[in-house]
Amino acid sequence: MTLASFPAIPALPGLNGLTAAISPTGSPAAPSAAARPARRRPLGWASGLAALLLIGCAQVPTPRPPVTPAPGTGEFSPAALQALRPAQFRSTVGSAAQAQARLESERQRLRAAVAAALASPRDTAVLRELAQGLSIAAHYNIEIDSARPALLAALPTLDSQPADVQRPLLSAAYTLYPQDAAPLLRPLLPRLTTPREFAIAAYTLMATRQPADLALIQSQLSAREPDEPRLRALALALATAQGVPQPQRPPLADLLAVRPGYPVVFSFQRPGRQQMGLALVRQADGHFVRRADGGLFNIPQLALSRSGLPGTITLGNTPQGLFTVQGAGRAASNIWIGPTPYLHTKVPVEASVAEFEQRAPGANEPAWTLDRYRALLPASWRQYAPMQEAWLAGQAGRDEMLLHGSTIDPRYYLGSAYFPGTPSAGCVVAMEYWDREGTMVHSDQLALLQAFTARGQDRGYFVLLELDPATAPVSLAEVIQAVLDAEARL
């Protein structure tokens, strides 16, 4: 089901008696881009620095996210997290009535941006506003067809625009209009000089699976920097598209024993991230967290970005691999993350070697290398290329890919394969629900926080792994035998 096939969203009643708060409050002129519907892929992308105030997972560059207190102290200590209850939280986006008023204001902004871009498809300021408008279309799943001509009109001369304008518009082409954009991207691709923007356009062309397009991408790659992390990831994806056999996944039970002595969140996802994933929590002693009734603790999670772009691209899907967890925090500027604390996950480079090894930094800290990252993995997983995506993402400059909750109404994505999940701008999202006045009534994120910190530790690890493709959400049945095997080795 494509985004364009969604109806316009009317005033929102409760969702089975509940409603997730859905839109930003504040000045109607402020950019609101955020969630991301589904099309042939998930939806979204960022649209400039101002929009980063509100969208996805990324925080504005200044100020940085709140500093996490030292372990065992403050608002985000394990003890404080254990005491939290859903009714304590109010949504950061307001009531359902406020959300509906915001939607109508944003619709008008979107229409104005499209009209201006059709009249002036080469004007940089106009294209910046179009990017903002397309983010609004993505968030509310509205006006998708009406925005198409404006975007397509801007593509032929997009190489004359700065990279920060190219990125959101190329991402929109990938997410919303890949088939329409492909003929325009073929002549444009050689003229895109920056690695990130070139890679986004190449991924869009790659989706056609036409031999001529794959050959064009291959020829362009061969003339560019081979060690650039986004281009390395693109080369691997191109090899897959060309039919090169992929590595066999090592035994899952081995991975479940990663980094003994620390709690670990494991998030299992589908390739393409179009189905809901599943999260488990392992304690520091190697046993997995059980519920009060003795069953294995598990929650749904979605590691899908609005854009659906690969993990080395800014605001793309959360990459596969090993992350360090550096306690909990709360988003200062991102209303879509909401008020529930997040787990602060970091990739290499974003995190120092000392942070990854969970120790105090020394006087002469070693530099990051791929071998140092691999050494953190179980031996059988060190050569498995998909687990190195987090390493490449860190090399590419990605950061702030958090584990957080959501204030976005899941009904925006009704009919998508991942419903009721809500995609983000590159983070991993657990479901939360809010009543019509904005009070929390259920939080999987809170349950995850409490499972992770149940033994008093808030430093540990996060592992994201894609399982086999399927059209169904990841189920406990797919991983439970590996859990039992891992625990049997203790």
Image (cartoon, rainbow, N blue to C red):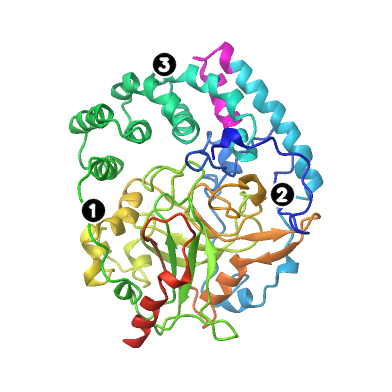
Please rate how many residues cluster around mark 1, counting C-alpha atoms within 10 Å: few if below 14, some from 14 to 19, many from 20: few
| Prevailing SS of the magenta stretch | helix
Residue 372 higher or lower than 20, as above or below: below
Tag 3: amino acid:
Thr
Q: Position of residue 163 (x, y in %)?
A: 41, 28
> Real-space Cα distance between discs 3 and 2?
37 Å
Q: Position of residue 418 (x, y in %)?
A: 54, 53
Asked if the stretch drawn in magenta spans residue 391, the answer is: no
Residue 357 higher or lower than 106, as above or below: below
Asked if the stretch drawn in magenta spans residue 129, the answer is: yes
- Discs 1, 3 touching: Cβ within 8 Å: no
Tag 1: amino acid:
Gln
> Real-space Cα distance between discs 1 and 3?
37 Å
| Badge 3 element | helix
Q: Is residue 341 left or right of residue 388?
A: right
Taking depth in this image into account, of 258 and 327 the one nearest to the observer is: 258
Give the residue number, with chain letter if any, for mark 3: 157
Q: Earlier in the sequence, mark 1 or mark 2?
A: 2
For the point 32% across and 63% down, the residue is 353
Q: Position of residue 401 (x, y in %)?
A: 47, 54
Give the residue number, with chain letter if any, for mark 1: 246
Q: What residue occupies the far left of the structure in this picture?
A: 222
Residue 367 higher or lower than 358, as above or below: above
Number of dots carrying numbers: 3
Please rate how many residues cluster around mark 2, counting C-alpha atoms within 10 Å: few if below 14, some from 14 to 19, many from 20: many
- Discs 1, 2 touching: Cβ within 8 Å: no
